Amino acid sequence: MAAKDDMRASIKLTTVADLFSTEESRADQQREKVMEIPLPDISDFPGHPFKVKADEAMLEMADSVKQYGVLVPGLVRPKADGGYEMVAGHRRKKASELAGRETMPCIVRELDDDQATIIMVDSNLQRENITPSEKAFAFKMKLEAMNRQGQRTDLTRSQVGNKLDGKKSSEVLAEQVGESRNQIFRYIRLTELTPSILEMVDDKRIAFNPAVEISYLAEEEQKALYETMQSEDCTPSLAQAQRMKKLSQDGRLNVDVIFSILTEEKPNQKEKMTIRRERIDRFFPRDFTEKQKEDLIVQLLESWYKKRQREQER
């Protein structure tokens, strides 16, 4: 009997209050919270394809952050070695830095690489002005993540959409972004361009369709093409780009052939004025791009023209 009394005494029953507090604490732990995280503790997403520029729009955002703070929290995920990795909110982070803030409000969420990639791309594709290169790398990253998710069988939920319903990842992506599958793959082809040529595409100095054809050229052929475009101040038409692609595939494309194709007279080609590079390069900073040089020259000519107009009106 004494042994039974001791056993009863050792058993501690959980009270109703304890049960409710435990459920509440568990729910609180699972609930996402907004935290003020020091900016140095937040690293950028690896391979983030969207450019974060200190342009006029960014300066306006920084002024807003300075006055009102960051109104929409960013999304970060914890890193294994400490700190956090930005998933959505790179521009808000930059604006916070420019505004002189030390922290930024963020939601902390546990995400695997593929989930984080998909959210990162989706949050940035909503922006109004996206360059071809940003779209190209974003589509590539998201499609690769979707393909990996579709191959897994341990997912209880998927942001891919309904790949298991028989749709390919590219079909789901096409529906999500409002582009055809073919156009998505054409954008992804741009990731095969050298950085210098891809910059020309972003600056609208090379049209999208010729750029897709150029992407099939080998790296050395693209470098030769870029140097010829710079020296001759010209870019290939779609027909010329297609010819170079075919010649490259046949192993017959070289510097001389590229020069010959680019310098041939195009149909309805307008006469244009060229200025030798050595005559004007000394007036520009070394890091100026061709587009910056052109913009500055046009700006100076417009100022000169307006001044001349005023003098004639006197």
Image (cartoon, rainbow, N blue to C red):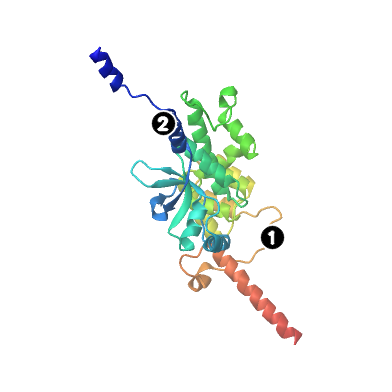
Question: In the picture provided, is 272 more to the left or to the right than 254?
Answer: right
Q: Identify the residue position indicated by label 2 in the image.
A: 18
Instruction: Tell me which amino acid carries mark 1.
Output: Lys
- Name the residue nearer the viewer: 53 or 194: 53
Please report the residue visible at 43 percent of the width from the left and 36 percent of the height from the top. Answer: 25
| Mark 1 element type | loop
Residue 118 x/y as whole percent: 52, 38
Q: Earlier in the sequence, mark 2 or mark 1?
A: 2
Q: Nearer the viewer, residue 136 or 42?
A: 42
Residue 298, above or below 117: below
**Mark 1 crowd level (few <14, some 14–19, many ≥20, 10 Å Cα):** few
Question: Looking at the picture, which amino acid does disc 2 mark?
Answer: Asp
**Pick the front one: 19 or 267:** 19
Q: From where the camera sits, is residue 247 visible?
A: no
Residue under numbered circle 1: 270
Residue 299 is at least partly visible in this image: yes
Which secondary structure lies at badge 2?
A: helix
- The residue sitting at 53% across, 54% down in the picture is 199
Q: List x then y, in percent, for residue 5.
A: 27, 17
Quadrant (top left/top right/bottom left/bottom right) for the C terminus? bottom right
Q: Which residue is at a point 41% across and 28% down the rendered structure image?
A: 15
State the residue lying farthest toward the front. 1
Q: Point out the residue furthest to the top here.
A: 1
